[in-house]
Amino acid sequence: MDNADRADTSHPPDAPRDRTGPAGTSAEGSGGMLRIGTAPGRWTILAMVLGSGIATLDGTVVGIALPAIGRQFHADVASLQWVVTGYTLSLAGLLLLGGALGDRFGRRRMFVVGVVWFAAASLLCGIAPSAGVLVGARILQGVGGALLTPGSLAILEASFVPQDRSKAIGAWSGFGGVASAIGPFLGGWLIEAVSWRLVFGINLPLAIIVCAIAIRHVPESRDPSVTGRLDYLGAALITLALTGLTFGLIQAGSSGWTAPAVVGPLGAGAVLLGLFLATEATRAQPMLPLSLFRSRQFSAANAVTFVVYAALAGGLLLLPVELQIVAGYSPIAAGAALLPVTFIMLALSARSGALATRIGPRLQMSVGPIVVAVGMVMLTRIGPTATGTGGYLTTVLPGVVVYGLGLAINVAPLTSTVLAAAPPEHAGVASAVNNDVARIAGLIAVAVLPVAAGISGTAYLDPVRLDHGFTTALLIAAGLCVAGGLLAAATIRNPAKLRRAKVLIPTGSHCALDGPPLRGSTSIGPSAADATTTPG
């Protein structure tokens, strides 16, 4: 449910920006900025929707393709874990750097470079002759995603006049939800009718269209106030740290926790993580400003994000596999099984944000994860009898609906709290940090949860063993969700004066497995400084 990551901007939205329109573009609006009702404005929104849609489609269909990939390559669980985590690993490690590169060298330029990189890596994924090559190509895809995803929202914020900005972001968010909805259908159909390889091939024509529109119509923007050297060392340290931790956690499933191949990478990852934090604390312009975490509300909201999104990513990694291997669903049916979540998020996210504005985020951030946990427990009923329309309506759909309601209750207040907890000049960085926290949580959970549930080797191809492990995994994930709700109840605080506090209400939706959204927000009330705590 990928979408989009707001990554950028170390300056307020209305700060001066270097703006050069592309050849042939008539920038309309005050100061050469775009208006939403003009042709350049519509072209710009279309390019950003399609660009972020590439990553969204990829994120929603890869999980559906895992059983087919495993069968073709005779891959074990560890290999399939790396197909998922390889992408997340490089994306999480380089996301903040991607936003900084856009600020410095031009957001449109880095957006186009990211799209081209992502498409080239997708082609390599589609022709991969082995699981190892596929994992390597997925890692390269993550690099492209780190260049692509920070730019889409930053370009909209930098290109449109202030009064049209929220409308542009809302349109981008809404159409992005459509990409989330059609992804499982399209991916499942391609897998069933042709091959899982076409799941990656659909990115190529989309990338050509996006690049043509962006080069022709999207204005360039950058942050002229950016000075100093980019934090390449920080990006390298966090990426290597995550690689060591992830490798060790995945290897533990087959080698045991005391094996040198597990202890060594885990130890190296921990040391590199410590070096990353030490480096960021001493740099004049760090990739990750640690001062953000001085806000207890910001730290608390990100802690809740880590726990809840670990549960979401780890628990639901196995759902498409369970539906196909155990319940006998076709790829397209498995892909469509979670569609109600998308529709619930589209319908209720804005209302949930509005409610949090009136009552504060604490109640929803406490109750939402527990409702998600109930949905996960209900989904443990999936088994060999959950086949056909009747099995879906009685066994799968109730749990999916409750799960979706829990997400709708929780996601908007969580995102609002993170953004409101940070100073306005760091809103983009705070957003990117929250996205990275969610992705890192998913990275670790995908590595650990199958092992904890007893699914290793080729156990996922045995319906009986997979069904047992799936139930265990969802119960563990449900327990994490409950812990996240209790953590929110204990640590999140409502603003002292709700009517005066600044609250950012997300107006879009987002796929929970991708991390918190940054799809459009509306600022209400005075500055965040009037609030005693910071929402997320």
Image (spheres, grey):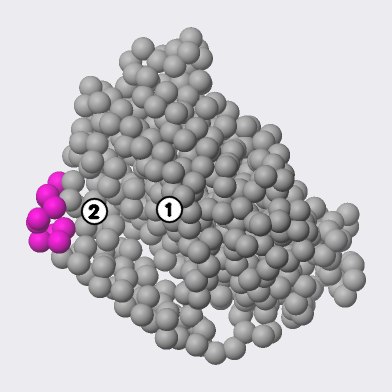
Seen in the picture, residue 54 relative to 526 is either above or below; the reply is above
Q: Which amino acid does the dot numbered 1 rest on? A: Phe
Per the model, the C-alpha gap separating discs 1 and 2 is 17 Å
Q: Nearer the viewer, residue 104 or 115?
A: 104
Dividing the picture into quarters, in which one does residue 217 lie?
bottom right
Q: Which residue, as the protein is rendered here, is positioned at the far front?
A: 496
Q: Which amino acid does the dot numbered 2 rest on? A: Leu
* Residue occupying the point 56% across, 54% down: 493
Res. 336 visible in picture: no
Measured as percent of width and height from the top left, residue 139 is found at 38, 59
Q: Does residue 336 appear left or right of residue 316 in this picture?
A: right
Seen in the picture, residue 123 relative to 378 is either above or below; the reply is below
* Residue occupying the point 46% across, 50% down: 490
User: In the image, which disc is placed on residue 249?
Assistant: 2
* Residue occupying the point 65% across, 56% down: 495
Dividing the picture into quarters, in which one does residue 110 lie?
bottom right
Give the quarter of the figure containing the C terminus.
bottom right
Magenta range: 254-263
Res. 421 visible in picture: yes
* Residue occupying the point 50% across, 71% down: 294
The residue indicated by pointer 1 is 306
Q: Nearer the viewer, residue 304 or 205?
A: 304
